[in-house]
Amino acid sequence: MSLSVIIPAKNEEFIIINTLYNLSENLKLIISENFEIIVIDDFSSDNTFNLVNNIKNPNIKCISNKLPGVGHAVKCGIENSSKNYVCIYMADESDSVNDLVNYYSIIKSENLDAVFGSRFLKTSKVEDYPFIKLVLNRIFNFIVRLLFYYGYNDYTNAFKIYKKDALLKLMPLVSEKFNIFLELPLKIISRKFKFEIIPIDWKNRKLGVSKFNIKELGSHYIFTFLYCLLEKILLKK
């Protein structure tokens, strides 16, 4: 078994090296050398690409995104991944390496197509989530949960793990921006793939600037939800 970790990165020069070092060192302890970390540089205007590209580590590679947008970065990462399982991990270290290791253990041992983390279960720990963003997150996820008629409560969270074969069956992916993180779990659910939901931790970034723009992305999320809802309805026929 093997693991590809996809990290979309745009202007992350202040934190990307630390993220990659911590991730690589922890994965070496768990799954030896049978993993790869693929950083997709999303048209950075800083030194992100050069910093990653100069790392002398056979498990880490940096690829330039083909089209701007984190959705395209994720698709580029999937296309260039070569392992059995694919995890999307954020460059800002908001995700927990321990949760990633847990993801990998569960998806392998239970032969699942995906494992979805939730930052909003009883045993989850969340640090310094911006208040307005948190309120909007909870409202939107509640609406998706209600209308899609499924009890998951953290659809928009990027940090999830998938079987590579399952991801290929979801193609084509239509989302260009952060809405891809909504499209992926909705398609997994509507196509009745095997998955599990577990609690995960999250902490706000300490360095750099978030690329998430609530005003810009609202219409993209609505489009993706309606697109996936239509697919779910059609699949029932």
Image (cartoon, rainbow, N blue to C red):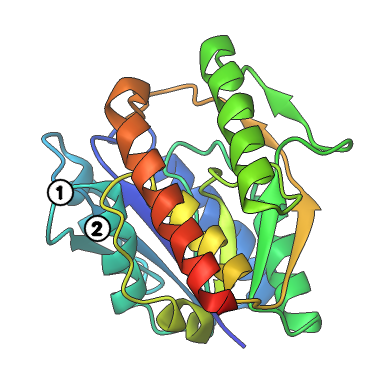
* Residue at 39% over, 34% down: 15
Q: Which residue is mark 1?
A: 68
Marks 2 and 1 in Cβ contact (< 8 Å): yes
Estimate the spatial distance between the alpha carbons at disc 2 and disc 1, rounded to whole Å.
Answer: 7 Å
Residue 79 showing in the rendered view: yes
Q: Which residue, as the protein is rendered here, is positioned at the far right? A: 122
Element type at mark 2? helix
> To which quarter of the image does residue 67 belong?
bottom left
Where does the image place residue 194, in percent across and percent down from the top left?
Answer: 71, 77
Query: In this figure, what is the number of numbered marks?
Result: 2
Residue 42, compared with residue 63, is above or below; it is above
Q: Badge 1: how crowded within 10 Å, few (<14), some, or many (20+)? A: some
* Residue at 58% over, 58% down: 160
Q: Tell me if 144 is positioned left or right of 13 in this view.
A: right
* Residue at 25% over, 40% down: 10
Q: Which residue, as the protein is rendered here, is positioned at the far top? A: 131
Residue 216, compared with residue 141, is above or below; it is above
Amino acid identity at mark 2: His
Element type at mark 1? loop
**Along the line of sight, which residue is nearer the eye, 29 or 150?**
150
Q: Tell me if 201 is positioned left or right of 32 in this view.
A: right
Residue 61 showing in the rendered view: no
Q: Which residue is mark 2?
A: 72
Where does the image place residue 24, in percent across and percent down from the top left?
Answer: 52, 60
Q: Badge 2: how crowded within 10 Å, few (<14), some, or many (20+)? A: many
Where does the image place residue 84, in percent across and percent down from the top left?
Answer: 53, 85
Amino acid identity at mark 1: Pro
Quarter of the figure with the C terminus: bottom right
Q: Tell me if 139 is positioned left or right of 101 in this view.
A: left
**Along the line of sight, which residue is nearer the eye, 237 or 29?**
237
